[in-house]
Image (tube, rainbow, N blue to C red):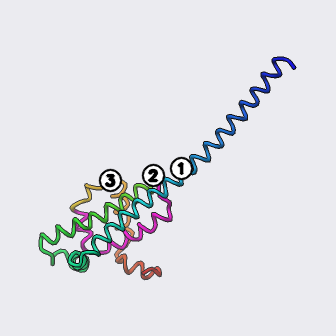
Amino acid sequence: MNWDALGAIAELISAIGVIATLFYLAIQVRANTKETRIASTGQVSQEMNQFLQHVTADKELSEFWLKALASSPSQLTELELQRAIMIMGSIVRILENAYLLHLEGRMKDSDWQGYKRFADRGMNSELFPVYWARRVGMHSSEFAHLVEQIIRDTSGVTLFHKAEHEGGT
C-alpha cells in the first residue's frame, strides 16, 4: 500500500470522526435546550408557589388581597391601594418573567399558556388598570405589548365571563 492510499484512508476516518462529533454535539445541544426549559419553567413555578404560599399563609394578607380584588380601587384608602398595587406587581413580575422566558424559547408554549390564562384572569379585576397605569413603564416593551393585546382582546367582555363562555372556570 502506498502513502497516497494511507493518506486517503486517514482523511476518510477523520471525516467520519468530524461527522460523528457533529451528531454528538447536536444531541447534546438538544438535551441542554430541554434541560434549560425545564429549569426555567421550574424557576417560574417556584416563584409563583412562593408568592401564593406567602399570601395564603398570612390570614390578614389573604383577607386584604381578596378585599382589594373584589373592591373598586376608589373604596380603598391610599395606603391600601398602594399595598394592593405592590402585591399585584409581584404577580405581574412573575408573569413577565415567564413571558420573557417563553419568548427566548426557554419555556414551552404549553407551559406559557397556563401562565397566560392566569394573567388573563388577573387582569379582570378593577385593580389591574390602576396598577397598569402606574407601573407600565416598569415592564419590558415586549410584556407591555402582550398586556395591551390581552386588554384589547377582551372586547368589552370581562375575562372571567369570557372564560366561562369558552368552557373555562
* Residue plotted at (71% across, 30% down): 14
Q: Quadrant of residue 149?
A: bottom left
Q: Is residue 3 above or below residue 135?
A: above
Q: CA distance from mark 1 to mark 2?
A: 14 Å
Q: Which residue is mark 3?
A: 140
Q: Taking 133 as reference, is 77 left or right?
A: left
Is there CB contact under 8 Å for labels 1 and 3? no
Magenta residue span? 104-133
**Per the image, is 113 magenta?**
yes
Mark earlier in primary sequence (3, 2): 2
Q: Taking 94 as reference, is 69 left or right?
A: left
Say which amino acid is labelled 1: Asn
Circle number at residue 104:
2
Look at the magenta stretch and give its main secondary structure. helix
- Residue projecting furthest to the right: 1
Of 162 and 30, the residue lying toward us: 30
Say which amino acid is labelled 3: Ser
Residue 26 in the image, given as x and y percentages of width and height? 61, 45
Is there CB contact under 8 Å for labels 1 and 2? no
Mark earlier in primary sequence (1, 3): 1
* Residue plotted at (33% across, 66% down): 50
